[in-house]
Image: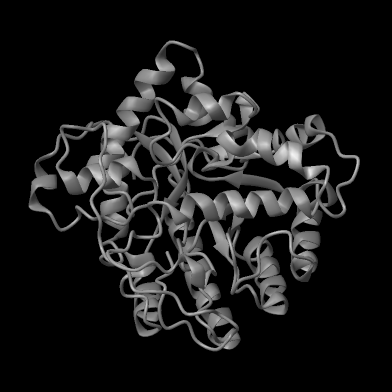
Amino acid sequence: MEECVGVENHGHAPHPPKGPVHVQSALTDLDRRSMLAAGVAGIAAFASSNPANAAQPVVRHPSGATGIIDVHTHFVPDAYRSAASAAGHVKPDGMPALPAWSEAEMLAMMNRLGIGTAILSISSPGVHFGNDAAARQLARTVNTEAARLKSAHPARFGFFASLPLPDVEGALAEVTAAFDKLGADGVILESNSGGIYPGDPRFDPVYAELNRRGAVVLLHPTSPHCPGCIQPGPTVPAPVLEFMFETTRAVTNLVLTRCIERYPQIRFIIPHAGAAMPVLVDRIAMAAAIMPGMAGTSPDAILATLRKLHFDLAGAPVPRLLTALRSFADPEHLLYGSDWPFTPEAAVTKLLARLKVSLASDGDAQAIFSGNARRLFPQLVEPGTAS
């Protein structure tokens, strides 16, 4: 997650420092800080330093993995923590801190929640802090560490490779290394890279290469490149609201630049149940016909394009957002995501339980928790006993 301050010299606009805020949630059995994390996907662990969370019940699976595939989960290796902190991202995206993470604790959390396989990724603010050479080195470092984790636990981990965008040349080199040498399962792209949004023609060489490889791309929100988002008074951490609108802005840009059509072999995963897209989809589809380069495009054609996208359900998609998403999404393109550790385990546990209850009556649980992901990532090793 990108803190909105001190971005260096690669065309980034300065962002405001941000502090915690309390919001309401339907999860009344969590304390107020846990409720914030439970109600908003991707929020860093507001409650991670709250001892009360340690007492929250968790779903335990003594026998280990049960086969859930988590396509939206993060890792925070020491090298990344050091580099992000040195670049000023000690409170990324206005959150209190980068959350604690370790290989052992992640495997333990996965066993407690019944997650068989987690596809790792670096969260916002990504790996580019203003210097191309440093970003290339950091991307290679975190991708190599992800490959090590996958090699050490082949049935438990996959990974989305980080790219040093907006450095296109560096990104192309990292795509080659990630897929051909490190065994990446896809790549992760931020909702903007130094103010350049997905679909921008400056990134076409990267999309062309990802399309050639038939790559899976996880689109992840970061803080907006938007001085107008600075507000006086108490500020709301970017994951609460801005991440949702950043995701929606990025997807809309993919549609209006025809990026999804021009690069049809890229399989995009849109996080957080589509963010605000499910409630704005008809408005966007209707307006597309009057946008430059979209003349004559029907709303039905826009909806058909959006139906090609995949969506993870990290955050709080039930009881309302998932219903809206299902009104246009392909049911075989819905995937599970925890957003751990930026969403703390107590909140992940509650949200997972709610999702299981919601899906129990319609027969989609197995597909969403593992079947759809297995089709998207057929190379994943079937989990056996916990490692």
Left or right: where 111 falls relative to 300 = left
Quadrant in which the N terminus is drawn: bottom left
Question: Foreground residue, 374 or 43?
Answer: 43
Left or right: where 174 falls relative to 246 = right
Left or right: where 120 falls relative to 267 = left
Left or right: where 292 falls relative to 86 = right
Residue 174 sits in which quadrant? bottom right
Question: Foreground residue, 379 or 219?
Answer: 219
Q: Where is residue 188 in the image (x, y as percent from the top left)?
A: 57, 58
Question: Foreground residue, 226 or 146?
Answer: 226
Q: Where is residue 88 in the image (x, y as percent from the top left)?
A: 36, 81
Q: Is residue 276 visible?
A: yes
Residue 79 sits in which quadrant? bottom left
Above or below — where is 368 with respect to 71?
A: above
Colour mapping used in the image: one colour
Residue 49 sits in which quadrant? bottom left
Quadrant in which the C terminus is drawn: top left
Q: Position of residue 18 (x, y in %)?
A: 32, 68
Which residue: 74% across, 64% down?
Answer: 200
Above or below — where is 278 with respect to 218?
A: above
